[in-house]
Image (cartoon, rainbow, N blue to C red):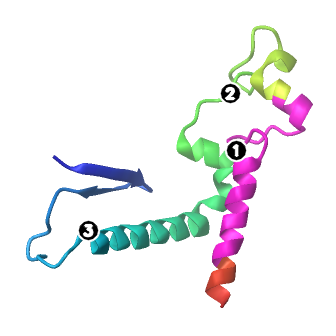
C-alpha cells in the first residue's frame, strides 16, 4: 500500500516502501529528498504556469467551466446577481481563479522570494 504524496503538473509522486538497494535511505533522508523535489516542482510551476494561472487563458487550459454570469453560463436573475457580477461589483474585476486576490498576491510574493534567493 503506497502513500500518495500528490499529483502536480501531470506526474505523480508515490512512496511504496524501501527502494531496492537503498538500505541507507533513512526517513530523514527520504523527507529531505521529497522536500527538494517539491521545491523543484514549485520552481517549475512559478517559471511556467504562474504568469497565465490567474488569467482566462489559464482557466481555459485547465478546462474550468465558466462561473455563473460568464459567457455561456447566464444567471437566471441576470448578470449582477451572478457570482461574476457580484465579484465585478464589489471587487472590481472578473479574473478567473481570483476572488479577493490573496492567493494571487501570495504566489507573486513567493515568486519574488525565489528570485531573490537565486540572486544571492
Tag 2, which secondary structure?
A: loop
Q: Earlier in the sequence, mark 3 or mark 1?
A: 3
Residue 53 drawn above or below residue 71: below
| CA gap, disc 2 and disc 1 | 12 Å
Query: Which residue appears at 84% of the width and 25% of the height?
Result: 86
Question: Image quarter for residue 73?
Answer: top right
Residue 61 drawn above or below residue 66: below
Tag 3, which secondary structure?
A: helix
Query: Which residue appears at 42% of the width and 73% of the height?
Result: 36
Closer mark to the observer between disc 2 and disc 1: 2
Q: Earlier in the sequence, mark 2 or mark 1?
A: 1
Residue on which the image places disc 2: 67
Q: Foreground residue, 36 or 13? A: 36
Q: Is residue 32 magenta?
A: no
| CA gap, disc 2 and disc 3 | 44 Å
Residue on which the image places disc 3: 27
Q: Are marks 3 and 1 in contact (CB under 8 Å)?
A: no
| CA gap, disc 3 and disc 1 | 42 Å
Closer mark to the observer between disc 3 and disc 1: 3
Closer mark to the observer between disc 2 and disc 3: 3
Place of residue 71 in the rendered image (x, y in percent of width and height, measured from the top left) = 73, 27
The residue segment tinted magenta is: 87-114
Residue on which the image places disc 1: 56
Tag 1, which secondary structure?
A: helix
Question: Image quarter for residue 99?
Answer: top right
Place of residue 76 in the rendered image (x, y in percent of width and height, measured from the top left) = 75, 8
Left or right: residue 47 compared with residue 4: right
Which residue lies most toward the top here?
Answer: 76
Query: Which residue appears at 20% of the width and 75% of the height?
Result: 25
Amino acid at each position: 500500500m503506497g502513500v500518495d504524496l500528490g499529483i502536480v503538473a501531470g506526474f505523480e509522486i508515490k512512496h511504496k516502501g524501501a527502494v531496492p538497494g537503498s538500505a541507507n535511505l533513512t526517513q530523514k533522508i527520504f523527507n529531505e529528498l521529497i522536500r527538494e523535489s517539491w521545491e523543484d516542482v514549485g520552481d517549475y510551476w512559478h517559471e511556467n504556469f504562474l504568469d497565465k494561472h490567474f488569467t482566462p487563458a489559464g482557466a481555459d487550459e485547465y478546462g474550468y467551466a465558466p462561473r455563473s454570469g460568464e459567457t455561456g453560463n447566464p444567471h437566471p436573475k441576470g448578470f449582477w446577481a451572478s457570482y461574476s457580477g457580484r465579484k465585478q461589483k464589489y471587487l472590481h474585476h472578473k479574473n478567473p481563479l481570483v476572488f479577493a486576490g490573496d492567493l494571487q498576491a501570495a504566489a507573486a510574493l513567493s515568486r519574488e522570494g525565489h528570485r531573490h534567493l537565486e540572486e544571492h
